[in-house]
Amino acid sequence: MNRLKFWNERAETMSRDELSKVQLEGLQKTVKHVWANNEFYRKRLTDAGIEPGDIKSLDDLRKLPFLTKDDFRDQYPLGMFCMPRNTIREMHMSSGSTGTPVVMAYTEADLTQWAECMARCQIMAGLQPGDTLQVTPTFGLFNGGFGFYHGARRAGLFTVPASSGNTARQIKLMRDFHVKGLGSVVSYLPRIIEVLEKEGQTLPDLKIGIFGAETFSDAMRQHLREVLDIDAFDIYGMTETGGVGTTGMDCPAHDGIHVWEDQYITEIVNPDTGEPVPDGEMGEVIITSLTREGIPVIRYRTRDLSRIVSREKCACGRTSLRIDRIPGRCDDMLIVKGVNFFPRQIEQALLQIPGVLPDYQIVLETKNGITDVRINVEAEEGVTGYTVAKHLKEVLGFSPKGDVFKPGSLPRTEGKAKRVIKINHDEPN
Ligand code: DLL
């Protein structure tokens, strides 16, 4: 059989004219659909003075009001549904840090759409029908596990639905079933490496890693290449847009995340003004779904930051818009001693220090209005706090305090890692 380069060559290589046509049709259909079937959306559009017939060109997208995570929360549990409950086949949910969850509901057609996006990602990463994919995110309300699974079924992969935890068993499964691809939350990888090293094992069949749910640095990708000999792909997605992979992934050229433009419109706007920023400039990612039924999103404010990397055809042959890998969320930027930085910059700097391991903690402690930062790292014997502080000074311009811990001693989380810990002595508990 010929090697597949694309899962859906027609959709992935459409000309700009074709894409624009598909996008306008999808946008018009989506606006009509939410207007006809959901009270919240109808009111939101009416308040903005919009009727479905007003969407005549793609430029009219900008007339539409934004949708936020708070809207999702306010409408919990069923208020965002745009299809009758008896047509819904699956739901996922994310709770985030503030409590009230965000719900996503899928009709049969939505599950097919998700599977299509994920199959495109899996084939783009180099997996072929018949290859084995181990899925380590949990199978539950978090969308990660099921997303990899739906896509893998569609792409004809052999899925090992390991779910999270029990790293020794994960490794045994990978070895016994000749797993070629691994789908994971990126912060689980250091755990796998730790156990592999402890047991003196390798994973000779593993070639491809599809990682996401959190930001990761180029140094981390390089680290994974060196230690595991795998090509690490950065997969993007979120509950609100329909889950992992719906908002794209980078290709083997690793030159930006390919957005599935026949399925979603992606805008980058200034997070303060909501106005579009020029190509190349960082801003907030805004996503509009074009084909979803259960809960479509119209101009969803992701709070994630990115920038448009290119609108040109990529070396891989795909024609879609490429956005930068996500450096962090609008609310992730840390400001300490007048310096702005993202956790990813810390990771990038730490991994360049020989002997420093990829687990770290950024502790921000505020007292009497002054915020101090401590950066705790795990490292092999011989790495001193002085060496770490010296490297970090080059990135931050100041030397943060911090401790160097033995490998395995910083707290482990299941699922997404908690890198930033904020302690505020000025606020009552
Ligand atoms: O994290 C979906 C996912 C699962 C993606 C597994 C990749 C792998 P949520 O729990 O709803 O969904 O969280 C979505 O996570 O708005 C980003 O802030 C962040 N995020 C997701 N993917 C990436 C990535 C899943 N590749 C939120 N890089 C998003 C950076 C990411 N951040």
Image (cartoon, grey):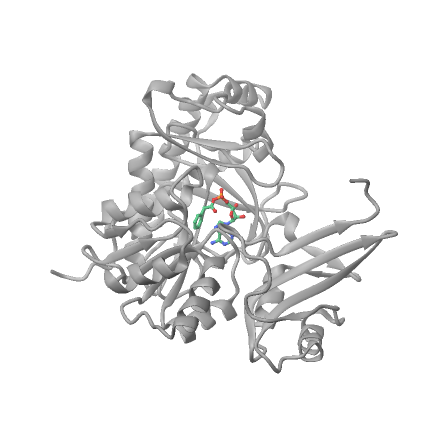
Please determine whether, in this image, residue 135 is positioned above or below residue 294: below
The answer to whether residue 348 shows anywhere in this view is yes
- x, y percentage for residue 299? 52, 36
- x, y percentage for residue 155? 23, 49
Q: Quadrant of the N terminus?
A: bottom left
Q: Residue furthest right?
A: 368
Q: Quadrant of residue 399?
A: bottom right
Please determine whether, in this image, residue 335 is positioned above or below residue 424: below
Left or right of 146, for residue 155: left
Left or right of 75, for residue 119: left
**Residue for point 24% across, 57% down:** 132
304 or 47: which is nearer to us?
304
- x, y percentage for residue 97? 61, 41
Tell me how many marks there are.
Answer: 0
**Residue for point 31% across, 55% down:** 134
72 or 389: which is nearer to us?
389
Please determine whether, in this image, residue 259 is positioned above or below residue 73: below
74 or 37: which is nearer to us?
74
The answer to whether residue 312 shows anywhere in this view is no
- x, y percentage for residue 152? 27, 48
**Residue for point 28% across, 65% down:** 175
Q: Quadrant of the C terminus?
A: top right
Left or right of 310, for residue 170: left
352 or 384: which is nearer to us?
384
Q: Residue furthest bottom?
A: 382
